[in-house]
Amino acid sequence: MKARVYVAMKKTVLDPQGQAICTALNRHGHTSISEVRQGKYFEIEIDGATDAQAELDEIAREVLSNPVIEDYRVELIA
């Protein structure tokens, strides 16, 4: 089974990299872009897990993200 894990800064946390990307886009003429939030994407292959969702939630929470400043989302792919 495959899964996708998306990790991004919480909305309440300043995202300086996202701001820099937004500024660069505006300078390149994309003035309709008003905000960019950047994040991380992981594609994970998981074998034989009885409760894949729970295991992936644990991995995302404890290893792939910093729960103090980041949110994550796990998608299972059949």
Image (tube, rainbow, N blue to C red):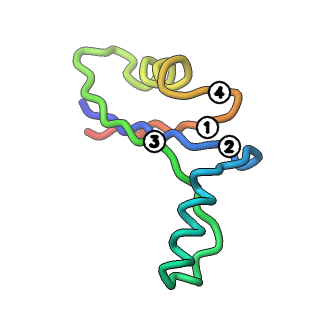
Residue 20 figure quarter: bottom right
2 and 1 marks in contact (CB < 8 Å): yes
User: Mark 1 highlights which residue?
Assistant: 71
- Residue 55, compared with residue 12, is above or below; it is above
User: Mark 4 highlights which residue?
Assistant: 67
Left or right? Give the position of 43 relative to 68: left
Q: Amino acid at mark 1?
A: Asp
Of residue 30 and residue 5, the one placed in the foreground of this image is 30
- Crowding near the residue tagged with mark 4, few <14, some 14–19, many ≥20 C-alpha atoms within 10 Å: some
Q: Earlier in the sequence, mark 3 or mark 4?
A: 3
The label on residue 40 is: 3
Q: For marks 3 and 1, give the CA distance.
A: 11 Å
Left or right? Give the position of 16 relative to 46: right
Q: For marks 3 and 4, give the CA distance.
A: 14 Å
- Residue 24, compared with residue 65, is above or below; it is below
User: Mark 2 highlights which residue?
Assistant: 10
Q: Earlier in the sequence, mark 2 or mark 4?
A: 2
